[in-house]
Image (cartoon, rainbow, N blue to C red):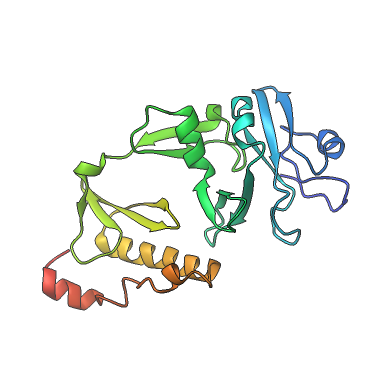
Amino acid sequence: MTNSDCPNYAKTIQPLITQTQAAYNVYRSFTGTDEYGSFFAYAFRSQPSDTPLYMWYVLVDHALRKRIENSILKARIEESSSIVIEEYTHSLDKPTRRLEDIILTECFPNSVNGVLTQTKHPLDYRTAFLKLRELPRAHSYKKVQGLRGIYEYDGAYGVRIIYNNIREYLGSVPTPLDGYRLYDKRLKELKEQYPDDLNIQKRLFNYQSPKWDELVKREGNL
């Protein structure tokens, strides 16, 4: 990535988008072609100018242009330094879907419980650079008794959290205690991100109830 201080340049991904292209198309999205094929470059122009990714571009397949061209997409950087891109409605300042979910629906219609992993640039969402991994189907999950958002499958533990109609998969961990901590970490981020959302603010952390030691005593070895 480059990050020019010149106000006439949008933030670009090189060599996919050259500074000349970005300058010519400043503050608007555009289509283009590089050595990997055609793309649609969506400019993050709907978020505050003081946010880290203001006026950067995210690349998607040209076929997705009609789906997202008039959408409101905003990007943010999580504590883990990963970039999250979410779609917002025009009437509510709350995210409705992640870009990954849109791509799964539009480009991988046969996926049942898929998760996408990027293999190239964190802002390049073209399907050529996305790896699809299917998680076990919902009926193969077994919820860990007493813990929020943690499910056992195939000898590992998956962690999820649901908020604002978004079902967010947080990852796979080797032990319930790791999942216990991962869920709480993400909930803490959400409480900080949405201070006025009562549903999120009322949500209990795992560490608040039950205490880990109390849970082990009650449920046995976890």
What count of labels does the image hold? 0
Q: Position of residue 78 (x, y in %)?
A: 55, 59
Q: Residue farthest to the front?
A: 91
Q: Nearer the viewer, residue 145 or 180?
A: 145
Using the image, determine if residue 98 lies above or below residue 177. Answer: above
Q: Residue 93: which quarter of the image?
A: bottom right
Give me the residue at 84% from left, 45% from top: 9
Quadrant of the image containing the C terminus = bottom left
Using the image, determine if residue 124 lies above or below residue 34. Answer: below
Q: Is residue 72 left or right of residue 26?
A: left
Q: Position of residue 80 (x, y in %)?
A: 52, 59
Q: Position of residue 170 (x, y in %)?
A: 40, 53
Q: Is residue 187 left or right of residue 96?
A: left
Give me the residue at 46% from left, 34% from top: 104
Q: Position of residue 181 (x, y in %)?
A: 35, 66
Using the image, determine if residue 36 lies above or below residue 115. Answer: above
